[in-house]
Structures are given as structure tokens and as C-alpha cells.
Image (cartoon, helix red, strand yellow):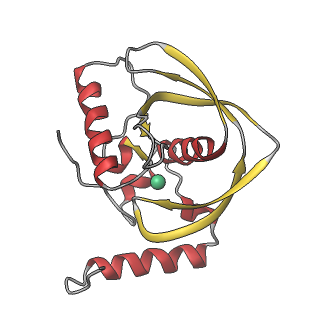
Amino acid sequence: MSIKDIIIVPDETLKKISDPVEKVGEAEKKLINDLFDTMYNSNGIGLAAVQVGVLKRILVVDVSTKEEKKKPMCFINPIIRKLSDDMSIYEEGCLSIPDTFIEIQRPKICEVEFIDIDGKINNLKCDGLLSTCLQHEINHLDGKLIIDHLSKLKRDLIVKKISKNKKDPDRIIV
Ligand code: NI
């Protein structure tokens, strides 16, 4: 088990476009395990490889509730094939942007093609929280963050606040 440090804004790595995975080898499988460990450790429901500083098109999600059995899902080289016209709104947070929640409207249903951990091509049609979470994580692979949905002014304010908090060692959240 290996928990990685999650990089946070304004780290420029988060703006980079991740590279497609050519082969699902041992390194990728280890990375996927680390992503799950890191995501569960932070109580997140999704995590992209770029968030631990690895620019590979890999992401993990688990949208199961506390009462349910864990449902880890891994997506390699995910491509959105279809988006619904119907939209839904969630208040989204991001492990790379502490203490920030933004209402974002996204297509309600999405169809995603991806490679699974065995290297096989798969398709998934999803709705609700899973659909939103997947779209959020796929945005990460393209260097796009939830704060990019805001005006530059609002975005700069949030990043400034986070950068300031980072330098203040006395601040605690209880
Ligand atoms: Ni995120």
C-alpha cells in the first residue's frame, strides 16, 4: 500500500495534458493501486494520475456510499463517446483544490470507452454521480479543473487563498 501526495493548485502540473497509456504493465498496475489507496485515504470519490504528478491517462473512481460495498473502478485512456442533452448539477469539490465547492452543470448521461486493468477495451454508459465524477476526472487528464468553470477573477481569488493558507503553518482545521 502506498499513499501518494496529492498535488494542489497552483501547481502547473495540473494544467498539463496527460499522455495515453501504450501498455498496461506492472508500473501502471502499481500506479492504479496507489491511486486507489490515495483516493480512499483522502475520502475522495475520484482521482486522476496527474493529481499525484504522473501524466498518464489513468483515473480511478468509487462512488459507492458508506453503507455499500466498495466499488473500485479504473479507467485507462478514457474517451467520452456520447453526452446527453439533459443536464444535471452537482456541487463539486476536488482533492487538488482544498475547501472549495463549485456548482457545475454537466451532461447527465455519458458514454465512455476505456481500457480496463486487463488491457481490454470496454464501454460504459453512466448516469448521476458516476457520470459527473467521470467527466470531472477526464477533465483532469486534459488539464482542466473545476475552477476553470469560473471567471478569471474568482479563480484567481481561490488560488490566492489556497496558496496563502499553505504558507501558514499555524492554521488548523478541526
Ligand atoms: Ni478533481
Q: Is residue 172 above or below residue 68?
A: below
Q: Quadrant of residue 153?
A: bottom right
Give the position of the C terminus as an image quadrant. Answer: bottom left
> Is 160 or 37 nearer to us in this picture?
37
> Is 44 or 75 nearer to us in this picture?
44
**Residue under the point 36% across and 50% down:** 51
* Residue projecting furthest to the right: 85
Q: Is residue 63 left or right of residue 72?
A: right
Give the position of the N terminus as an image quadrant. Answer: top left
Q: Is residue 79 above or below residue 167?
A: above
Q: Is residue 26 left or right of residue 136?
A: left
Q: Is residue 173 above or below residue 143?
A: below
Q: Quadrant of residue 96?
A: bottom left
* Residue projecting furthest to the left: 1
**Residue under the point 54% across and 73% down:** 155
Q: How many marks?
A: 0
Location of residue 95 in the rendering, given as x and y in whole percent from the top left corner: 40, 58
**Residue under the point 32% across and 56% down:** 42
Location of residue 170 in the rendering, given as x and y in whole percent from the top left corner: 20, 87
**Residue under the point 49% across and 44% down:** 63
